[in-house]
Amino acid sequence: MITNISEFDIKFRKKSVINQKQELAQQASRKSGEIRKEANLDQKSPICIYNLCDKLKVKVRFVDISMEGMYLKEEEPQILLSALRPFTRRNFTCAHELGHHVFGHSSTIDELIKDSEKFKPFYPEEFLVDSFAGFLLMPTLGIRKAFTSRGWDVFSPTPLQIFTVACSFGVGYETLINHMTYALQILNTTKADLLLKFTPKSIREQVLGFSSPEPLIITDKYWSMPTLDAEVGSYILLPSKAEVTNETIIFQETHSQGCLFHANRPGIVRVYCPDIDWAVLIRISRYQFVGLSQYRHLEEPEDE
Amino acid sequence: MTELKDKKAIIASRIREARKMAGLSQAQVAKILGLHRPSVSEIEAGNRNASAEEIAKLAEIFDVSVSWLLAEGVDKVDIHDSKIQLAARELQKLKPEDLDRLLILLASMRTGRDNL
């Protein structure tokens, strides 16, 4: 129906899809750089998307509605994210919805994307904000630096290396591979297909030594964000000799790559590794937290 | 008299609903407001009237409008309400029960227009 086609859509249908995609990706990349600059963020470090939304005065609320997310164009703009989606997926969807905001799009609901619907029709606005989310969360310089600083070959990474870097940028394993392949063009499709034969579940099993449905976050001394966000139930692999200040996360076992902890309760805990002079604030939210983003790490007060 | 009682019950239930939508426990709300937890519980049960100052503070921490909290607005917005800046085709993407929850949330939200 003609009424469903925006002027934006009509304009871009005249060009070939490939040209459109290139143009939109460049636009998205530029805009992500501008937004980082506006928020006084550098062009390479991983970011907390919720802190960025806060800086840009866009409220974020987690809801138990079955969808991906929603952008509400109001005088006080809001992003609604489904708490029912995987943790890293929420980060990406938040960046996607922020894209709708910074590009001045109207209010929109992003439906649940099932694996069977990956090859959906090309919608320029959606491609634009998806690209924006990718560049914002996984900037070109930052991704290259994440591999090279660890002494890893960015052109030929192993599944575990991809998994580790994805953890440090707060995105999913498959999301990082697709971004490195199609947006950054660092990986060729053959390499990407090989990497995609591994799943986060199989990598978790390889690292933990047991099968677990719970997410795993791998950190190392190259983790550059001052914070690490997770939810109750997640496993967190910290550098060896990690010392924690409370029981928000509980030590599980010594591991060949460090110390394994389990997220125990909502709250914030400081982690310090004296041997490598490395520290991070770990912020744990309730499992599938529903509510305003600023309350997601509030700990339960002790009984009076 | 009954009408007043009904309204009191609606306000109490909206305070509870708004708290849950904000992701806070009664104990967390009590701590933020500097109250004892039983006071919040009593307010939500309709056994204790919240003062005007407390209502304003609750609306602020829950990020809802005072008018919605005081049951002066509708429980949920109509699908055709201009407050929803979403096209009908967008709303059709949601399941009926999810749409219902969204319409309640939209009715409760503080906006630049209806913020008191």
Image: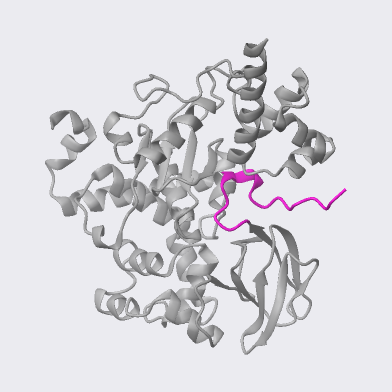
User: Magenta segment, principal secondary structure?
Assistant: loop
Q: Is residue B87 left or right of residue A173?
A: left
Asked if the magenta segment contains residue A295, the reply would be: yes
Based on the displayed image, in which of its 4 quarters is residue A280 positioned? Answer: bottom right
The residue shown at (67%, 52%) is A297
Q: Which residues are magenta?
A: A286-304
Residue A222 visible in the shown view: no
Horizontal and vertical percent position of residue A269: 74, 62
Q: Residue at x 51, y 24 (%)?
A: B75
Q: Is residue A12 above or below residue B55?
A: below
Q: Position of residue A240 (x, y in %)?
A: 70, 82
Which residue is painted at 34% across and 42% down in the image?
Answer: B95
Q: Check if residue A248 falls in the magenta segment.
A: no
Residue in the image at 61% along x and 33% along y: B18
Evaluate whether residue B10 shows in this view.
yes
> Considering the image in quadrants, where does the N terminus of chain A appear?
top left
Query: In the picture shown, does residue A98 fall above or below B6?
Result: below
Q: Quadrant of residue B108?
A: top right
